[in-house]
Image (cartoon, rainbow, N blue to C red):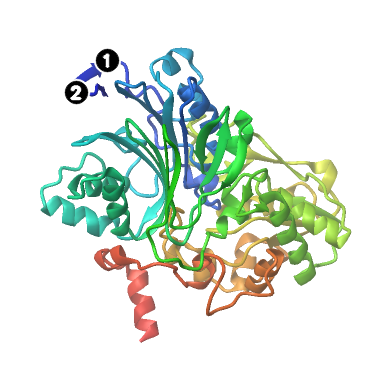
Amino acid sequence: MDLHHDSSGEAQTDSHADLDFGPQADLRDPDLDGDTLREECGVFGIYGHSDAAAITALGLHALQHRGQEAAGIVSYDGTRFHSERRLGLVGDTFSRREVIERLPGNAAIGHVRYATTGATILRNVQPLFAELGAGGFAVGHNGNLTNGLTLRRELVRAGAIMQSTTDTEVILHLVAHSRRTNFIDRFIEALRALEGAYSLVCMTNKKLIGARDPLGIRPLVYGELDGCPILASETCALDMIGARYIRDIEPGEVVIFDETGAHSHKPFPPKPARPCVFEYIYFARPDSIVGGRSVYEVRKAFGAQLARESHPDVDVVVPVPDSGVPAAIGYSQHSGVPFELGIIRNHYVGRTFIQPTQAIRESGVRMKHSANRAAIEGKRIILIDDSLVRGTTSRKIVRMMRDAGATEVHFRLASPPILYPDYYGIDLPDRGGLLAATHSLEEMRELIGADSLAFLSIDGMYRAMGEPARDPAAPKYADHCFTGNYPTHLTDQSLVEPTQHQLSLLAEAS
C-alpha cells in the first residue's frame, strides 16, 4: 500500500498502489542467460513539466535495457507525493493511462532496476521515498555502495529502522540524521559518507537533484525539454522524448534544479575520472553517447582492434546477438570478411514463458537463439560476442553452429577476460564463478567447444578508445573486472565471510 503525503505530513492511503500486479517469479534464468552480464539500473527525472510522469515513463522505456526486474515513478503535484512501483517491465505498468493519472504533478523521477543489492521484492523497488523533517524526499540510485553494509549497520545501531534491504536506503537515513540546517548541505554531508559508485536522481517538494560519485563511475546526463531540465542515465532517454542534450553531469558534481534555475555544487576535491568501461562494452545502448563518445562507434572500434590482434582464416563473421553486433561489424569491416546474421534472436521469449523440464532446459538457449543455416552451412565462421562470464551460453551457441553445418567455429570476445568480480553495480559472480579466472585459455576453448578462442587485449581495448595504451599508474577507466585494480575502497568486503575459493586464493598468494 502506498502513501500520498501532503505538505502537512498527513498520509493518505492508495488502495491500489504498490500491489504486486507484475510477475512474481524470479526473472533471472541462469540456464538461458548464464553467459550474460547483468544490467545495473537506470534513472530519470524531470522538473517543471505538466506531463512529468508520462515523460518519465517514456524515458524509462528507453532505459529498460539497464534493468528489467522492476520499475517505479514518484511524482509531486505541489501538495502531495505519489508513488507507483511494480515488479516487471516498464510497459507492464506505465503504459496504462490510469496508472499515469495516479501520478499527477509537474515533477517526477523514475527508476528501472536490476537487483545488485537487495532481493527482487517490492519494498526494494525504487525510487525510495521518505517523509523527513524538512519534507518528502525521493531517491533513485544507479550504482552500488562499497560501504553500504557498513553504513547500514552503523545506522541501525543508532536507531534507524530500515524498510528495505537495498543500499540506497542508507542515503535516506544519512540525510535524515544530518544536523545541518540547509537541505543541500545535509544531502552533501550524506554523500561524503559514501564509497563506491552512484549516480543519483532525487526529488523534494521544491527541487530536482542529480549527483554523481567523485570518479564518475556511473553515467548521468543533463538535458532539456520545453525549457524543463531532465536528468537521465543515458542520452538515448533524451532522444526517446525529443529532448536536447545539454551536457554530462561531471564526476563529483551535485546539480540542483528549482524555480530559480540550475545550481551546480562541486563539494569534493577533484580527482581523475574513472568511468566504468563496461558502459562501452555492454551496458549502454548503442545509440547513446557516453562521455562524449558514440557507444556504437566504440564497439565497432573494439571489433576492428580485435581483428588486428587475432584473425583466423574464416569465411564469415557472425555476431552473437544483440550485444555482439557492433563489434562484429567492426571486425568484418577491418578484416574484409563478410558479415552474416548466422544467429537469429527471438525477441519474444518471456522469462516466465514456460517452466521446462531439465531435458528441455539443457537446450533452452534455442528458445532465444536460432541458427540461420543458409548463412553458415559448409562455412568456417568466427563468432563475435562482447564478453564471456561463465561460458554456459557460449558453449551452447558453438554446438548450435556445428549442428547447423559450420565446418569450423572460432570464437572471439571484444573485451579482455573477466578475472575479478564487480562491486559497483554489475552482478558478476565471485572469482570461482568466472570462467577466465579459473581456466586457462586452452581450457576455456575446449570447454566451449570452439576451434580457437581469443580475447581483446587490455591495451587493445584502450587503443580502440583513443588512448595509446593502458597506463597502470593512472588508468583512464574503471577496468577492475579485467585487472583487479579497484578504483575505490571495498570496505564491506571485510565484513563478508570469505568463500572456500577465496580462502584458497589467499593461501596460494601467501
Q: Residue at x 56, y 43 (%)?
A: 234
Number of dots carrying numbers = 2
Q: Is residue 62 visible?
A: no
Q: Residue at x 23, y 18 (%)?
A: 13
- Left or right: where 304 falls relative to 157: right
Q: Tell me the residue that label 2 is attached to.
A: 8
The correct choice, above or below, for 208 with respect to 186 in the image is: above
- Left or right: where 225 falls relative to 490: right
* Element carrying mark 2: loop
C-alpha span from label 2 to label 1: 21 Å
Q: Tell me the residue that label 1 is attached to.
A: 15
In which quarter of the view is residue 463 placed?
bottom right
The image shows residue 71 at horizontal and vertical percentages of 43, 32
- Proximity of marks 2 and 1: CB atoms separated by less than 8 Å: no
Look at label 1 and name its amino acid: Ser
Q: Nearer the viewer, residue 354 or 324?
A: 324
Q: Residue at x 17, y 50 (%)?
A: 179
Q: Residue at x 44, y 63 (%)?
A: 421
Q: Is residue 470 visible?
A: yes
The image shows residue 483 at horizontal and vertical percentages of 52, 72
Q: Earlier in the sequence, mark 2 or mark 1?
A: 2
The image shows residue 265 at horizontal and vertical percentages of 41, 52
Quadrant of the rendering where the N terminus is positioned: top left
* Element carrying mark 1: loop
Quadrant of the rendering where the C terminus is positioned: bottom left
- Density class for disc 2 (Cα within 10 Å; few <14, some 14-19, many ≥20) is few
The correct choice, above or below, for 202 with respect to 310 in the image is: above
- Left or right: where 410 falls relative to 18: right
Look at label 2 and name its amino acid: Ser
